[in-house]
Amino acid sequence: MLILTLYILLFIFAFISYQFISRNIGALIYRRKSHDYNERKTVTFGDESAVKPNRIASVLSIITLFVIWAAFTGSKLIPLHVPGPFTGETSFTYNAINAENKVDQATVYVRVAHSDETFKKPEISQQESVNNTGFAKDDALKVMAWRSALVRVKKNDEGGKDKSYRIVEVNKQPITETQPVRVNNGVVSITSKGSLSFVPDKGWQMEPIWLPAPENVVSRLIEISRHGYQNISLTENIGWSLLRVLAGFLLGSLVGIPLGYAMGLNGWFRGWFDPIVEFMRPIPPLALIPLIIIWFGIWETGKISLLFLAALWIMTIAARAGVSGVNISKVHAAYSLGASRFQVLLHVIIPNSLPDIFTGARVAMGVCWGTVVAAELVAAEKGAGKMIISASKFQQTDVVIMGIILIGIIGYGIDVLMRMAEKKLVPWKGKT
């Protein structure tokens, strides 16, 4: 919640700052006069084709995500961080009552350090030992950051093993199993067996096992790029995932687009296939994995069949929507000029439905890319998903994060390529 709130505040700040600069200062710097089709439009609000991505906003978005990630992981790449876990030395006192109903006090000296550091318990000085003449004896404790450690006072104190021995206060505050005590740089609680548990302050930074710093992920990417992961190269893992996606998407498109055209042009086809398409469309592809494994096994046939089904219904609906969205006046104009049905299909329906088909293709590719990774999590010898699930079993979070980032970058790259193809092949989108 804290990270989300910070992200929203940074977004609002960046948006207001950009608007202020562009209106008051940046008229000569940021605004470049364009010479395209949108320049001649008198109305742009509500016209999706006139909305172009603000590249400054894109750069600021990426920088914001990186800064938040680095700040909450204690990265060395930026100087500003949110408060991290406590490290260093601290202490607290406790009061105990022995079997003779006497009260004595002792001090616990604590040293906290990161898990990648070699450290020892703090030493109790000779003077402190001399002052410890009662039954409660001073003790020392070492704790790793983000962790907790037990102070076994019953073993350390004289008469601590007696049933009537108990600890009643920590830093002169009452303590029970349900009432921990806040001390300097941490919290002390008492267990059911009478031991004290010290938890140092964790701060706001994420523990590396949950979220590693950006430089750790980059170093892992370089390492795996050079030496591979579990005897499989990174390019081989990514390549297998891409091949599966392309095969499933192409098969789904080859079947789905003609089926969508048939449903959009013929009542019998629409009546016959509409219940099937509308029934299968809301079913998540991942829900079909158990059935696909039963039918086709865990090898490539099963994965490609799953991706085929993931793309099929999306492309079918996209093609059908493309046919439905054709301006009927264009169809009438073609017929009035003597065009045949085939000519109407070839020169009117297909060109005007291509924008919807490309939109469906972008959605289908995204779904296929997400599905193949999930399918590889279930059963695969190679692939991006297989690399991620293998790393998670050994708590190699840096490899998992690296795999997720690569999946996102590749998915974004595929979408960019499809948008470029759409711009090249369908230049009339939004202009007719």
Image: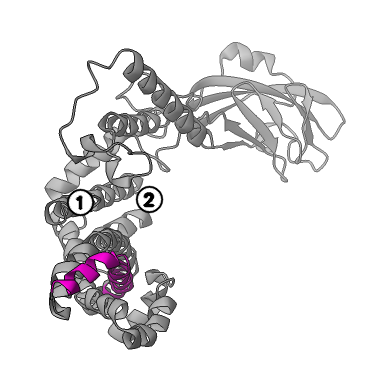
Q: Tell me where residue 324 sits by quadrant.
A: bottom left
* Residue that mark 2 sits on: 395
What segment is highlighted magenta in the picture?
308-337
* Residue that mark 1 sits on: 419
Q: Nearer the viewer, residue 195 or 214?
A: 214
Q: Is residue 206 visible?
A: yes
Please state which amino acid type lies under the numbered disc 2. Gln
Q: Which mark is residue 125?
A: none
Q: Residue at x 26, y 80 (%)?
A: 262
* CB under 8 Å between discs 2 and 1: no
Give the residue at the far right of this rendering: 101
Left or right position of 313 against 415: right
Work out how far the residue at label 2 is from the one at label 1, CA to CA, in angstroms.
Answer: 37 Å
Left or right position of 69 against 164: left
Residue 420, given in percent of the width and then of the height, sits at 16, 50
Q: Which element carries disc 1, helix, strand or loop?
A: helix
Mark 1 is surrounded, within 10 Å at the Cα level, by few (under 14), some (14 to 19) or many (20 or more) other residues, namely: some
Q: Residue at x 12, y 52 (%)?
A: 424
Q: Nearer the viewer, residue 7 or 398?
A: 7
Please state which amino acid type lies under the numbered disc 1. Arg
Q: Nearer the viewer, residue 88 or 167?
A: 88
Residue 318, given in percent of the width and then of the height, sits at 30, 67
Lower position in the chain sequence, tag 2 or tag 1: 2
